[in-house]
Image (cartoon, helix red, strand yellow):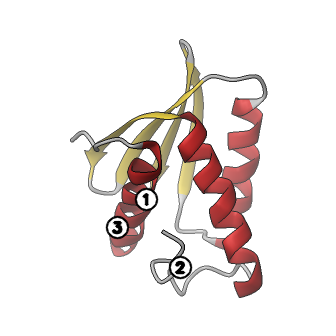
Amino acid sequence: MTDLDWVPTACTLPTEERPLRVAEWDALFAGHLTTLERPAPTRHRLSLSEAPGLEERVRELADRETGCCSFFTFAVTPADGAVLLDVTVDPAHEPVLQALSARAACLAGLEERQ
């Protein structure tokens, strides 16, 4: 899962920084992702196990991601024992969201729920 071919050309993050950013997301997914739902093709909801500082970490990472991939919209919501991360894209970037979710599910050992 180290191949970055799924990263869209619309991403403005310098190429040399992309593996580091992917590693940040990977660590988040592998360490905290508990469920992954797809309420719509262009909106996915990731539930992350609550941990000290996690909400702030997710918000900061989502803010940085939006800075280079403006087609993403992130909503971070604290929930009972979890942090919810809703990720939305426009229809043109649906394949990117699908790839991100597939990667997240694989790293966390989960199956996506429709």
Tell me: residue 102, above or below residue 76: below
Q: Is residue 66 visible?
A: no
Residue found at x 56% / y 49%: 74
- Mark 3 crowdedness (10 Å alpha carbons): few <14, some 14-19, many ≥20: some
- Mark 1 crowdedness (10 Å alpha carbons): few <14, some 14-19, many ≥20: some
Helix, strand or loop status at disc 2: loop
Residue at the disc numbered 2: 4
* Residue 64 picture location, percent across and down: 74, 59
The label shown at residue 88 is none
Q: Is residue 76 visible?
A: yes
**Amino acid at circle 1:** Arg
**Amino acid at circle 3:** Glu
Helix, strand or loop status at disc 3: helix
Judge left or right: residue 104 versus residue 27: left
**Amino acid at circle 2:** Leu
Q: Are marks 3 and 2 in contact (CB under 8 Å)?
A: no
* Residue 6 picture location, percent across and down: 45, 78
Residue found at x 38% / y 47%: 44
* Residue 27 picture location, percent across and down: 64, 49
User: Which tag, 2 or 1, sits closer to the chain's start?
Assistant: 2
The label shown at residue 103 is 1
Tell me the mark number nearer the camera, choosing from 3 and 1: 1
User: Which tag, 3 or 2, sits closer to the chain's start?
Assistant: 2
Residue found at x 69% / y 56%: 24
Task: Return the residue nearer the eye: 109 or 94.
Answer: 109
Task: Return the residue nearer the eye: 9 or 20.
Answer: 20
The label shown at residue 94 is 3
Residue found at x 28% / y 44%: 112
